[in-house]
Image (cartoon, helix red, strand yellow):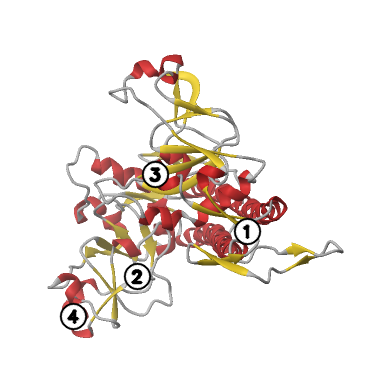
Amino acid sequence: MSNLVESLKQTALGKIPTEWSLKKFEDCTDKVGSGVTPKGGSKAYVESGIPLLRSQNILSGKLKLADVAFITQAQHDKMKGSKLKAGDVLLNITGASIGRCAVLPDNFDEGNVNQHVCIIRTNELLVPSYCGFFLNSAMGQKQIWNLQAGGNREGLNFQQIKSFSIIVPPREEQQKIAEVLSTVDQKIDLIDQKIAETQKLKTGLMQKLFSEGVGVQDEEGNWQPHTEFQVASDVNVPACWNLMSLENIATVERGKFSARPRNDPKYYGGDIPFVQTGDVVNAATYIETYSQTLNDLGLTVSKMFPVGTILITIAANIGDVAITKYPLACPDSLVGIQANESKCNVHWLFYFLQTQKSELDSKATKSAQKNINLQVLKPLTVYLPPLEEQSIIAETLSTVDEKLALLEKQKVETQQLKKGLMQKLLTGEWRVPLDS
């Protein structure tokens, strides 16, 4: 690729090479339209047949067909105006997913769409894959969201879509740009696949380690599998593990924020980290970031927890956990669990609590916002291996989490690379060499 552009011209979307053009979608498309929901709604769906793509099937740059609906051939024929073809660009035009765009691959057979998905069928001026990348770029998304500003309901109509501007390089160059960006997408997909495989590995390891353990050491120091088991919370666990309540191996305390109204600014803006439920949900193992801070007055109405405390969410999201790396304050939607180190390895307890998420969620009150309290957490049965075995279990799972963290880092870096490439390539700041 070259970043040398000999001559540029100014357009509504910025400077582009002089041999490129800026056009409206209506000049570059043969069709802009959508389908309908079959009469009877979901009752018209069948077990198998013609795929009916809905907004949940259109992601940013890819299709998700795991939960695709199907309609009959007769219904498909009635909806002939929205029959799909390979190369169609599909754009979500209503709801929270507005603006998501994907392109039907060359091997796509047949299908249809409902009224929430717009079909953009390009003419000879536009390569479909290039069009898809443009719509998913910052330039495309900005045009979509500018049309939503001030609207009461999210939604795009066909005339608005036809009025979109798009930068149009020569067709051969469009193809090359799309190939470069597709290569980056393939790398992201590969990383996603590795993440899914590693998460599956972790799930299997957790099931095995928290039911079978790693065993006991023989006289020569070799680890041998456990042979005797007991039942704990409907799970068979080694007989040598101790069954104890959470409150007997850890201090379990609820966070606090007693001031009302909660958003009174006089309590905020100091240097005391104030962690919210979302900060725990979004954490991997440790709390790395926080969304708010308290001042000294705010601390008087809240509660601090020390380094090494396990925070667990007890409202809305139930049972998500993370470990503190620095002293911080928490509201009453979080509980702090401080392990007794003479009985319990904090990292082992962190992973054990992950295995209890579904159990805790099932005990949540079914009110407007799900929640649990200390009366649910404190008596929680913990099946406790010896400390050395706890340490091995925690180290094993930490190794897997380190691999996951590395993969997530690679994914973020590759997504940033793609974002930068899109900005450079779609504006012509960087040119893709063409075959001579």
Instruction: Identify residue type, mark 2.
Output: Asp
Please tell me how crowded label 3 is: few (under 14), some (14-19), or many (20+) other residues with Cα within 10 Å.
Answer: few
Q: Is residue 327 visible?
A: yes
Q: CA distance from mark 1 to mark 4?
A: 61 Å
* Image-quadrant location for residue 190: bottom right
Q: CA distance from mark 2 to mark 1?
A: 43 Å
Circle 1/circle 4 CB separation < 8 Å:
no
Q: CA distance from mark 3 to mark 1?
A: 24 Å
Q: Which residue is mark 2?
A: 67
Nearest-to-viewer mark from 1 and 4: 1
**Could you tell which of marks 2 and 4 lies nearer the N-terminus?**
2
**Could you tell which of marks 2 and 1 lies nearer the N-terminus?**
2
Going 61% across and 69% down the picture, which residue do you hit? 229
Question: Tag 4, which secondary structure?
Answer: helix
Res 75 label: 4
**Could you tell which of marks 3 and 1 lies nearer the N-terminus?**
1
Q: CA distance from mark 2 to mark 4?
A: 19 Å
Q: CA distance from mark 2 to mark 3?
A: 39 Å
Q: Which residue is mark 3?
A: 375
Please tell me how crowded label 4 is: few (under 14), some (14-19), or many (20+) other residues with Cα within 10 Å.
Answer: some
Circle 2/circle 1 CB separation < 8 Å:
no
Nearest-to-viewer mark from 2 and 1: 1
Query: Residue 106: percent from the left, percent from the top?
Result: 43, 74
Instruction: Identify residue type, mark 1.
Output: Trp
- Residue lying farthest to the right in this orientation: 220
**Could you tell which of marks 1 and 4 lies nearer the N-terminus?**
4
Instruction: Identify residue type, mark 3.
Output: Gln
